[in-house]
Image: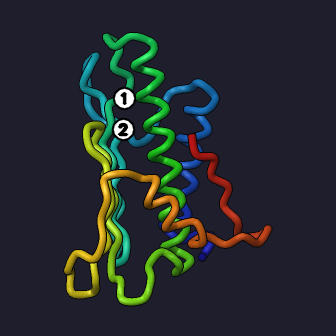
Amino acid sequence: MEKDSPRMNVIAELRAALASLDAGGELSNFVEGHGLQSQLFKFSWSEPTLGIDLELPYACVLDDAEEQAADGAEIAASIRMAILLMVAAGNGTLLLDGEGRLAVFHDGDALGWAVYDVEGNLLDDAEDWETLVARLENAVPNDAENAVTIIWP
C-alpha cells in the first residue's frame, strides 16, 4: 500500500481519532451535527471494492455517563473496523475469488455487512461484525513491516 495515498491519509486520521478516544479525549474530526443531543460520528468511504458507512451518536451531553461511555466504545470499535477494512482493501486481500465489493454499515441501531459479486448480486451478508472479523482474520499481513494491530473490545 502506498504510504501517501488518500487511503493511508484517511487511515492516519482514523488512528488519530481512535487515539484521542482511547486517551479519554474528544473527537475533532468526523463529527457532524450540532446541539446537545444531535452530534454524530460520521465516516464514509467508497471505492470499487469497499463501502463503509458509519453514523453513530457522539457526545450526547444529556445522556448519562454510562451511555456516553458505551457510545464512545462503539465509535472506537467502528473506527477499528474501518481501519482493518481499509488496510485489507489496500493490500488487495479484502475479497475472495468471485467477489466484487464489500459494504459495511453501522448507524447506532443496526450494523452489518454484505458481499456482492462483480455484477452486484448479493453473495453473503450478516447483521454482526463477529462474522466479518472471522472472515477478515487472514486478510491483513502478519509481517512486522505491514502488520496492523487491532485490539477488539
**What secondary structure is found at the residue carrying circle 2?**
strand
Q: Can you say whether 60 is above or below 10 in the image?
A: above
> Which one is in front, 38 or 52?
52
How far is mark 2 from mark 1, CA to CA? 6 Å
Residue drawn at x 38%, y 23% as measured from the top left? 59
Q: Amino acid at mark 2?
A: Phe
- Quadrant hosting residue 122: bottom left
Colour scheme of the picture: rainbow
Looking at the rendered image, the quarter that the N terminus falls into is bottom right
Mark 2 touching mark 1, by CB under 8 A?
yes
Q: Is residue 33 left or right of residue 67?
A: left
> Which x, y percent locates residue 47?
35, 72
The image quadrant of residue 19 is top right
Residue 29, position in %: x, y?
44, 40
At label 1, which amino acid type do we have?
Tyr
Q: Residues within 10 Å of mark 2 (few under 14, many from 20)?
A: many
Residue at point 56%, 72% (across, down): 139
Along the horizontal axis of the image, is 141 left or right of 115?
right
Dot 1, crowdedness within 10 Å: few (<14), some or many (≥20)? many
Q: Position of residue 12 (x, y in %)?
A: 58, 54
* Residue bearing mark 1: 58
Q: Looking at the image, which residue is at 26% across and 38% down?
A: 109
Q: Which x, y percent locates residue 143?
A: 76, 72
Relative to 72, residue 62 above or below = above
Circle 2 residue: 41
